[in-house]
Image (spheres, rainbow, N blue to C red):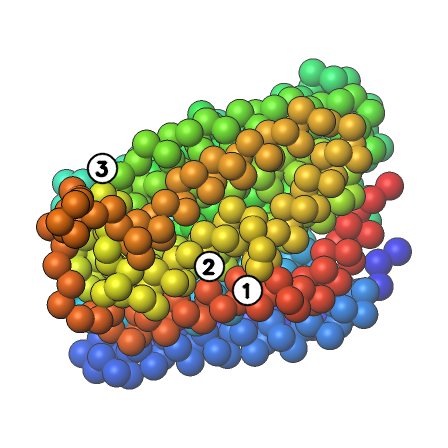
């Protein structure tokens, strides 16, 4: 029996950014007040999340029923905050503040149009994200998942040009199409199989069900592909296509909200819908493992060939998401712990890299890696942060990525999946191959015999960083990547609490 606490704190945490939307619209002509409404909402949201933290650390869960079950369908809309939801909420709410500050500098620096619409949907998407984090059953999870898809579509199409509209169509068709084709039937099947009980409290929803290998595999893949924000191949093309959006949106998609919602849903499905025992009994998890492993390697190889920095980061994200899916699909407690930790590790590392990409574009107009040789001298803070963010994503010290990837590797080894452990190692080498040369060339560019830079027209004219509102957030998130390596205690404790609640 769960030790639960009834509280409205999850509701207030979601409402904090939702209530900011009308303020952002009202102050559309008062730029300072509009931006302050965004920042204040972020601070208040984080405050409510932090107020829930001591309760979760005591091993309790917070439950709030929003809407009772509809007549004939006894499935309420309910919030349930546990250790996994708390980690995701902490990541999303804290990084939203950094992203908001960065967005202010970026949008002002480029004098972007429709900034009021941008900040309004930005706030709405964070409400949906926390709704997913706090979802107490499968129906609530799905409703907020779709709310996030719809609220981020205007952000992807922000520029309103042909390329943005094309990227937006791909984005929405993939996310809604896979949802209708896979997720809805999977949820209906689960509802019927579990006699209407879709709650994540107690044992896994299907833990006591009589299922064979093939039905378990098909249902697992229906959920995994239905929640296509996880970026598993072949349903990954929306993610690079969404790079037509402004960089703050890319950072939101890759680090704070959308893709993390995808892997969060997969973790919930594996642990909360099937359960470790059921999947392990039939070995159905291994099918998902190898799909994720294939995605890890192929996306890393594609990333190597990308000259556009944001597209390289996008394919990197596809691989890193598959790390998380692969870890939880291994069903070993160390690997699951590594997956949960990698949600935070990848978030702080990847958001740093996207912040840097945007700062480079604002300061120099450059978006191709081949144009960036020597820029480290002009933008030392940005490229130093890029290097630290790269270490976090690669999994090298001193970064939190080392801790999460160590758990993933050790989990694969102890699960007896040596081949999958090799996949992690090969991918790490590929990560280093497509990230480290960028920083190296930025600080130590190739020169010819006369001392001129090779294959670039770069001429140094002194330090020229992006506006402070862009540089400060990337320095903060880069520092987080390193700081969490030395002080991972809170993340480890929350991850242990979650693993302890789902292991057999």
Measured as percent of width and height from the top left, residue 435 is found at 40, 45
Task: Choose between 309 and 14: the one closer to the eye.
Answer: 309
Q: Is residue 79 visible?
A: no
Query: What residue sits right under mark 1 in the picture?
Result: 482
Tell me which corner region of the image, top left, top right, bottom left or bottom right, holds residue 213. Answer: top right
Which residue appears at 51% of the width and 42% of the height? Answer: 320
Q: Residue at x 38, y 35 (%)?
A: 303
Residues under numbered marks 1 and 3 in contact, where contact means CB atoms less than 8 Å apart: no
Identify which residue is drawn at 52% across, 73% down: 45
* In the foreground, 359 or 70: 359
Q: Which circle's residue, 3 or 2, is located before the other in the chain?
A: 3
Q: Residues within 10 Å of mark 2 (few under 14, many from 20)?
A: many
Q: Of the residues under marks 2 and 1, which one precedes in the sequence?
A: 2
Instruction: Name the residue beneath numbered marker 3.
Output: 166
For the C terminus, give its image quadrant. top right
Q: Are marks 3 and 2 in contact (CB under 8 Å)?
A: no
Quote the CA–CA distance across marks 3 and 2.
34 Å
Q: Which residue is mark 2?
A: 388
């Amino acid at each position: 029996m769960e030790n639960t606490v009834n509280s409205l704190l999850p509701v207030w945490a979601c409402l904090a950014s939702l209530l900011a939307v009308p303020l952002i619209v009202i102050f559309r002509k008062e730029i300072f007040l509009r931006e302050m409404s965004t920042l204040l909402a972020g601070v208040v949201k984080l405050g409510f999340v932090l107020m829930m933290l001591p309760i979760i650390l005591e091993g309790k869960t917070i439950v709030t029923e929003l809407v009772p079950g509809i007549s004939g369908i006894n499935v309420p809309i309910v919030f349930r905050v546990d250790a996994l939801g708390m980690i995701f909420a902490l990541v999303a709410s804290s990084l939203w503040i950094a992203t908001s500050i960065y967005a202010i500098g970026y949008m002002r620096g480029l004098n972007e149009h429709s900034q009021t619409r941008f900040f309004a949907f930005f706030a709405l998407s964070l409400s949906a994200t926390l709704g997913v984090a706090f979802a107490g059953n499968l129906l609530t999870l799905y409703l907020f998942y779709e709310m996030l898809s719809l609220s981020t579509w205007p952000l992807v199409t922000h520029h309103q040009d042909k390329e943005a509209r094309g990227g937006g169509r791909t984005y929405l068709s993939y996310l809604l199409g896979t949802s209708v084709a896979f997720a809805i039937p999977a949820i209906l099947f689960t509802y019927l199989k579990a006699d209407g009980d879709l709650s994540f409290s107690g044992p896994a929803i299907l833990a006591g069900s009589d299922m064979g290998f093939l039905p378990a595999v098909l249902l697992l893949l229906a959920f995994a592909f239905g929640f296509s924000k996880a970026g598993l191949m072949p349903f990954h093309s929306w993610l690079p296509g969404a790079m037509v959006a402004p960089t703050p949106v890319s950072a939101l998609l890759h680090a704070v909200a959308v893709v993390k919602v995808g892997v969060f849903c997969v973790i919930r499905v594996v642990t909360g819908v099937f359960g470790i025992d059921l999947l392990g009994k039939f070995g159905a998890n291994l099918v998902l493992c190898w799909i994720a492993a294939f995605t890890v390697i192929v996306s890393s190889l594609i990333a190597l060939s990308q000259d556009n920095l944001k597209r390289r980061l996008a394919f990197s994200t596809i691989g890193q998401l598959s790390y998380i899916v692969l870890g939880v699909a291994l069903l070993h407690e160390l690997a699951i712990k590594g997956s949960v930790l990698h949600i935070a590790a990848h978030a702080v590392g990847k958001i740093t890299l996207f912040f840097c990409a945007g700062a480079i574009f604002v300061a120099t107009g450059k978006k191709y890696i081949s144009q960036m040789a020597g820029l480290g001298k002009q933008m030392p803070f940005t490229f130093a942060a890029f290097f630290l963010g790269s270490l976090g994503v690669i999994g090298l010290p001193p970064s939190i990525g080392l801790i999460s990837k160590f758990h993933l590797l050790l989990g694969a080894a102890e699960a007896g999946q040596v081949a999958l452990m090799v996949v992690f190692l090969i991918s790490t080498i590929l990560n280093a191959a497509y990230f480290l040369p960028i920083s190296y060339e930025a600080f130590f560019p190739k020169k010819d015999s006369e001392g001129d830079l090779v294959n670039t027209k770069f001429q140094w004219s002194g330090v020229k960083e992006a506006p402070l509102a862009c540089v400060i957030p990337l320095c903060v998130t880069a520092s987080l990547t390193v700081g969490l390596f030395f002080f991972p205690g809170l993340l480890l404790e929350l991850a242990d609490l979650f693993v302890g609640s789902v292991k057999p």
